[in-house]
Amino acid sequence: MKDPRNKRILVVDDTPDALDILQRNLASKGHCVFTVSNAADAVKILESASIDLVITDYKMPRISGLDLIRHIRSNFHETEVIMVTGYASVKGAVEAVKMGAEEYLPKPFTDEELFSAVDRALNKQELRKIVQDGKPYATADNFGIIGKSKAVRRLLREIEKASRSLATALVLGESGTGKELVARAIHYSSKRASAPFVPVNCGAIPEKLLESELFGYVKGAFTGANEARAGFFQTADGGTILLDEINEMSPAMQVKLLRVLQDKQVCMVGARKMQKIDIRIIASSNKDLKTLVDKNLFRDDLFFRLNVITITVPPLRARPDDIPLLVTHFTRKYMEEIGGRAPVFTDEVLRSFMGYGWPGNVRELENLIHRLLVMTDGKRIDLPDLPPFMRFSAMPGDLPLRSLAEEENAYILRVLASVGGNKSRAAAILGIDRKTLRDRLNRVIR
């Protein structure tokens, strides 16, 4: 069976030696290579065969490489183009890119430079097809984790290993990366899959209520406790509890949690008798707990108890190849809600997505896709439809250089915008507290 990565490539050059070298090099990688010496013959090949990539010389008699690129872009939208020239210039590169060339290779170039340019062009083609075809990639085996990059494949292997054990697990990662999704995947692929999975956001529960919410309370334990109530630990008995954002837990609660981990027992608020529990604990944090331990902001003995199995969820910027898959997934998800035919994301938008840093990670991408689908009326989503800070990121070379302070201020505003103005989430992403963020914003606005 033919390797799907091996493509049909058309090489256009009026120099026989150049044609011969390119043909041999590309064929050595398993590609099917067509060679012609002029643009007119190239057009005939394009009309008679399905070509994935055209590599064309810049200067050729009668019809230039630029004219050929213009023809390809007008008639063969799925075909990628690489411009090769011995007359390298900034103007030539700009013209080639404007006409639609994905890559610009000045002669002489090495074999490695050629192969890298070909791989990049073909990868962009594959990514675009994924989005346009709208094929979902999520499978039941992945528990909703979307992606096929090396980072995601490594993550899935770690989840599989963690699910074989009942040991305490620590899931680390920036906000919006999908830490709860990973915890669910560990639980539902383990022997405890039929038992409860109970997620608890430690940062969302007031400190005074956290103990009673986690461990429950007996009747009369405090004013308003008119009846006994089980806590999250009792609810999760036999299954798994996720202590999300455990870094927000107070030192006093850390001591009580440490005792639970040691004794496998909980004591309801107001009770004297301990209750045995059969529970697996998974903790998550958007901050490096070891750093917090070094700063005496997190107990070292609790950290060592939690840090039996550690899984770090990669940020979205570390797996850009998964972005088209995620775009497809979220588009299908929200178009089922909105109804109608999904608009097409242009190549420029996809390139902008691939080059953006995504400080809010997958959650930011999902929110943006949802907003674009709701707010865009046309059949295409193009650069003008994106938020201003993303339109700028699509053309980094056109931006004037700024001071470090200006760049820092712009980044703070961009992060804040990406999370809908939520200062707590923005501060967490930036790695600063809310007061510091407020002071910085005051300086930016002045």
Image (cartoon, grey):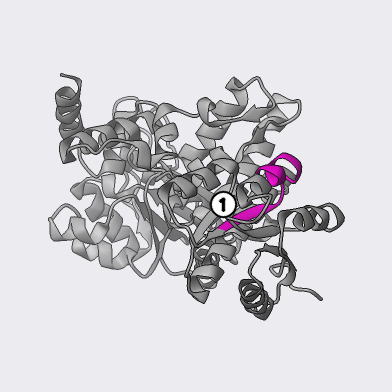
Quadrant that contains the N terminus: bottom right
As rendered, which of 414 and 191 lies closer to the eye? 414
On the image, the x and y values in percent for residue 322 come to: 56, 53
For residue 339, above or below residue 17: above
As rendered, which of 317 and 304 lies closer to the eye? 317
On the image, the x and y values in percent for residue 10 come to: 72, 63
On the image, the x and y values in percent for residue 101 come to: 58, 50
Write the residue at 40% across / 41% down.
360
For residue 416, above or below residue 253: above
In the displayed image of the protein, which residue is found farthest to the right? 48
For residue 434, above or below residue 323: above
Question: Would you say residue 193 is visible in this rendering?
Answer: no
Q: Which quadrant holds residue 14?
A: bottom right
As rendered, which of 265 and 18 lies closer to the eye? 18
Element carrying mark 1:
loop
Characterize the local packing of mark 1: few (<14), some (14-19) or many (20 or more) Cα atoms within 10 angstroms.
many
Does the magenta segment cover residue 64?
no
Write the residue at 17% across / 41% down.
404
On the image, the x and y values in percent for residue 316 come to: 45, 51
Give left or right: position of 434 versus 95: left
Does the magenta segment cover residue 71?
yes
Quadrant that contains the C terminus: top left
Give left or right: position of 287 versus 321: left
As rendered, which of 58 and 8 lies closer to the eye? 58
Question: Would you say residue 211 is visible in this rendering?
Answer: yes
Give left or right: position of 47 versus 88: right
Write the residue at 55% across / 49% down.
323
- Start and end of the magenta stretch? 70-83
Residue denoted by label 1? 102
Type of residue at label 1? Glu
